[in-house]
Image: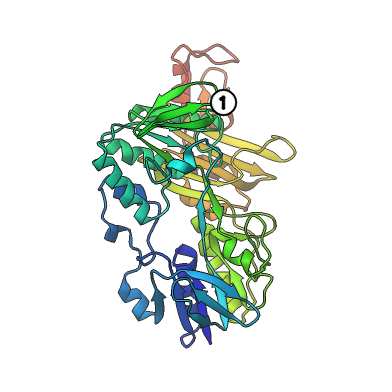
Amino acid sequence: MEIHIIGNNVAGTFTAQNIRKQNKDVEIHIYSEENYNYYTRVKLPEIISEKRDIDDLIVFKEEWYENNQIKTHLNTKIKSINPDIKYMVVNESEEQISYNKLILAVGSHPNEPPINNARERLGNGVFTLRNINDALKIRRFIKENNCKKAIIIGGGLLGLELSKQIKNCGLDTRVVEFFPRLLPRQLDIDCANMLKKEVEDMGIEIELDAKTEKILANNTIEGILLKNGDKYEADIIFIQAGVRSNIELAKEAEISVNNGIIVNKYLETSKKDIYAVGDCIEFNNQTWGIIPACIEQAEIVASSVLGKNKKEYKGTTPKTTLKIVGIDLTSVGVYDPEEVGGGWEILKKADKSSNCYQKIVLKDNKLKGAILFGKKDGVSFVNKNIESEVSIEDIRKAIDAYIYKCENCGAEYDEVKKGIAFQDLPENWKCPQCGSPKKEFKKIEQ
């Protein structure tokens, strides 16, 4: 049996790996439009600042593919698919390649918000960052044009990491975010404010609640105009406003699509023997653009394509664990329930003196989500216990929170319920029950 995978990204490569683990005999082919084997996109900004070389980003070297008997076809774009006769057509050569099973791991592309003059200037002073070639073009443009000022439109994960590396290139750097806070999909307002301060302390300007109306340019890039009339100067502009699933190849083959390629619980598409995995899929009206989802789906689609439909996809709990601009950050599951009550409970400890924020979200005593910012101590506890029942005592230990007791009247200050670290309370703070000073409170050892 021949299995063909379109896409040598994390979803495509891990799918191939899982297929090979389960079956040593099937032929596996991977097709990629790029000239590189699977690499991590998270570190692309470091190519621009020359902190890393291309080889540093490559996850699996050529030997890995050879050892696993996986045939790669680089610089190969698939133009079309014929699901009825079961072949696909290579773009330039028009070669027809037959398949027994086909897996679409075609990924996603940068979202382009409706900004006047952006599309016209794309590649000429306005850039998106999605692959190695993008990073090399950006690096070259900065040098050749002696860029001094940069604007990043988008305060998401990649936008913030990009801002740090652009700052490392010696450019004045400004992040312009449409939403009222940074990382709106990962952080609540309190933690986002702490992150904003941390980023600004690095010398990066932040503009929130700011909608970019137009790219200002004549012969060269001049800056941006916001909807409120504010203008900011720049020599180079980056648009990092999220991603959209690649669906065109599937759509032209009359495979069912919406925001993504629609799949069932076995990651089968609407056409027989064609599957989809990764950023490009839509399951239960939802798309995912996160690595944990790709890895989880890769295991399931490998079983499905080999006829072992024992594993079912049920969706992936949103999870982000990254070192953003040098800060440890983990965001898992439901981090900011709209209505507290009805079984929801929030336990948190904000330690402004060390710029750490730890929040645990429970529902009916089950751990439903968390934000861990500035400290990694609770990450393993959260990963191990997500969707499981946990005790407040275990949570206190995991996030290093304590109860302080007034030696005069016995009143208690529980850090996870008050939300503020005891040491962050002002020195003139007094016991709300008896008025004793802060120094009369002693920590209860766990």
The furthest residue to the front: 219
Task: Mark 1: give few (<14), some (14-19) or many (20+) Cα within 10 Å.
Answer: some
20 and 268: which is toward the camera: 268
Q: Secondary structure under badge 1?
A: strand
Q: How many marks?
A: 1
331 and 277: which is toward the camera: 277
Q: Amino acid at mark 1?
A: Glu
From the image, tell me which residue sits under label 1: 412
What residue do we see at 50% from left, 84% from top? 23
In this view, 212 is above or below 97: above
Q: Is residue 443 visible?
A: no
What residue do we see at 37% from left, 51% from top? 134
Residue 346 on image: x %, y %: 62, 36
In this view, 324 is above or below 199: below
Residue 128 on image: x %, y %: 43, 46
In this view, 198 is above or below 66: above
What residue do we see at 47% from left, 20% from top? 425
In the rendered structure, the answer to whether residue 274 lies left or right of residue 423 reads right
Render colour scheme? rainbow
In the rendered structure, the answer to whether residue 261 lies left or right of residue 212 reads right
305 and 320: which is toward the camera: 305
Q: Is residue 231 visible?
A: yes
Residue 320 on image: x %, y %: 49, 49
What residue do we see at 45% from left, 23% from top? 231
Residue 220 on image: x %, y %: 35, 34
